């Protein structure tokens, strides 16, 4: 044992006169006790932690807390946005003990954070400031550091400035454009989508000559979507040369060749778009960029009238699909409803079965969705076909269902169950429809929808579980909303 070790042990009262063996045994006995004893924490040199002053905030009731845990634990997970909406509506706060889990989930789920941020209250803000990871959720973009921060925060800064001062935002982007990767350039261009000014139009026109195809395509879509740009005018002029109306009948001519300026404006000469070969593909690309309301103005018709004329032409399928693409790009509500209604009315015609309405379902309003869906249900006799347009709408659209639509769909299922005797698998797609309806229809219809199910049907046992789950979700949502309202009143 070295002299230095003897000196260190001496600090604990172990004599230097002891043999090495006795000294080690004594040290072992002492340090065994020390390891079990409490220790004074180190001084970290920081000020006392700020207390959370949330005394004025009213937490939701124990029953609502129970409902929230049932949602977060997965039993009724899709009900979370609705819970948060009614929580805010009734001026209630989230239980503090669940905030950490929700904040952690928000880091990877932007949709959750958008619903949550209005409900976290003072305690939530206090917690966020204590955790560097969570603090990113409340980061206020600082313009001065925009080139140094991570990309997501740069986008937030750029989006904020573009809303307040488009010219300034555009100049900032121009300064860093050459150093940005292609994917980041595309992200910045997407921000410009909501606000294409004359200044940004000049910038985007320059990008039509970019060496990257992805950048050129993004610039074309932005210029076309703005509708009041030179490119949008050029596209409509071209389309008007190929599509003409004479005595109520449309004539369609296909482009034999593309001029250089058309190729620069994003028309790919090699694309076979939808049906009809390369020439039809060229016209389809042009039409898909034109705002559909331009045709209404040119012909003096509404959307349904223009669509009726287009779909009677020799190139009806091409015109219909082009209008779908143009409507999705420009997010036009009148044309969205007209196209969906047209597709519902022509369910059985083979030539329309290839029309893809999926993009329209992403932009349709609740009101238009319900009008079209009710129209489709009223024109349906018997079981909905699995691949019919109305089934696609009911299964995939996130719109809220009207009471009329809900009753029609449920009654349709009841009627089928009452009359079916063996082929229970024919209605398999109704299971998906029921799951969607459980969170999109009015929960206060629960008692009415619970009645008159054909429980004596031979195939009832094959459907009982799905139907009971549907009704239990409605019951839960109704109780959840009632509790938040009643706790406010009390």
Image (cartoon, rainbow, N blue to C red):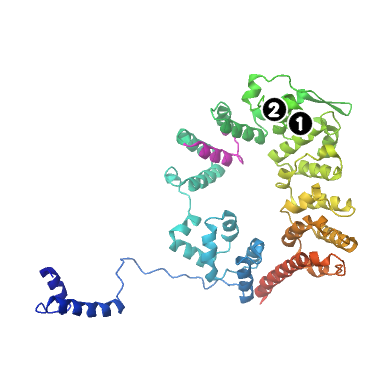
Quadrant assignment for the N terminus = bottom left
Q: Residue at x 76, y 68 (%)?
A: 468
What is the secondary structure assignment of the residue under circle 2?
helix
Q: Is residue 401 above or below residue 150?
A: below
Left or right of 295: which side holds 330? left
**Residue 385 lies in magenta, yes or no?**
no
Q: Let me know if residue 146 appears in the view.
A: yes
Quarter of the image where one finds residue 330: top right
Against 316, residue 53 (above or below) is: below
Residue located beneath label 1 in the image: 275
Seen in the image, is 326 located left or right of residue 5?
A: right
Residue occupying the far left of the picture: 17
Report whether residue 301 is seen: no
In the rendered image, the vertical position of residue 22 relative to residue 191, given as above or below: below
Q: Are marks 1 and 2 in contact (CB under 8 Å)?
A: no
Q: Residues within 10 Å of mark 1 (few under 14, many from 20)?
A: some
Q: Which residue is mark 2?
A: 235
Which range of residues does the magenta coloring cover? 180-200
Where does the C terminus fall, quadrant-wise?
Answer: bottom right
Q: Which mark is residue 346?
A: none
- Residue 395: % across, % down: 75, 53
């Amino acid at each position: 044992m070295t002299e230095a070790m003897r000196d260190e042990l001496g600090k604990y009262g172990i004599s230097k006169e002891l043999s090495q063996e006795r000294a080690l045994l004594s040290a072992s006995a002492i340090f065994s006790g020390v390891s079990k004893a409490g220790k004074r924490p180190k001084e970290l040199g920081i000020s006392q932690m700020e207390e959370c002053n949330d005394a004025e905030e009213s937490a939701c009731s124990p029953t609502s807390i129970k409902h929230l845990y049932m949602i977060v634990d997965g039993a009724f997970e899709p009900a979370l946005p609705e819970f948060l909406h009614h929580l805010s509506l009734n001026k209630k706060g989230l239980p503090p003990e669940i905030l950490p889990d929700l904040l952690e989930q928000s880091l990877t789920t932007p949709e959750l954070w958008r619903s949550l941020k209005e409900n976290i209250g003072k305690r939530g803000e206090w917690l966020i400031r204590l955790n560097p990871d969570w603090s990113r959720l409340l980061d206020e973009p600082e313009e001065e550091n925009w080139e140094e921060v991570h990309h997501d925060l740069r986008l937030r800064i750029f989006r904020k400035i573009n809303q307040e001062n488009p010219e300034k935002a555009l100049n900032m982007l121009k300064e860093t454009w050459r150093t940005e990767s292609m994917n980041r350039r595309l992200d910045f261009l997407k921000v410009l989508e909501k606000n294409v000014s004359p200044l940004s139009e000049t910038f985007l026109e320059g990008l039509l000559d970019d060496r990257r195809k992805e950048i050129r395509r993004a610039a074309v879509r932005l210029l076309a979507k703005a509708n009041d740009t030179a490119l949008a005018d050029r596209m409509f002029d071209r389309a008007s040369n190929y599509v003409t109306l004479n005595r109520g009948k449309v004539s369609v001519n296909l482009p034999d060749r593309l001029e250089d300026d058309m190729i620069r404006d994003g028309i790919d000469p090699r694309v076979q778009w939808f049906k009809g070969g390369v020439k039809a593909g060229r016209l389809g690309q042009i039409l898909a960029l034109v705002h559909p309301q331009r045709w209404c103005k040119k012909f003096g018709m509404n959307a349904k009238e223009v669509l009726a004329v287009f779909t009677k032409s020799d190139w009806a399928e091409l015109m219909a699909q082009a209008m779908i693409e143009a409507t999705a790009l420009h997010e036009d509500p009148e044309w969205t409803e007209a196209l969906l209604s047209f597709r519902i009315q022509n369910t059985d015609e083979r030539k329309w079965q290839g029309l893809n309405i999926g993009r329209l379902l992403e932009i349709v309003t609740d009101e238009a969705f319900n009008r079209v869906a009710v129209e489709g249900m009223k024109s349906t006799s018997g079981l909905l076909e699995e691949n019919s347009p109305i089934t696609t709408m009911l299964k995939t659209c996130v719109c809220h269902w009207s009471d009329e639509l809900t009753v029609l769909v449920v009654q349709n299922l009841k009627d089928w169950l009452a009359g079916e005797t063996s082929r229970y698998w024919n209605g398999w797609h109704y299971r998906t429809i029921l799951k969607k309806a459980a969170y999109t229809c009015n929960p206060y219809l629960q008692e009415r929808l619970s009645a008159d199910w054909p429980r004596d049907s031979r195939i009832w046992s094959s459907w009982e579980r799905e139907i009971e789950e549907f009704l239990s979700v409605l019951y839960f949502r109704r109780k959840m909303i009632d509790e938040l309202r009643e706790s406010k009143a009390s």
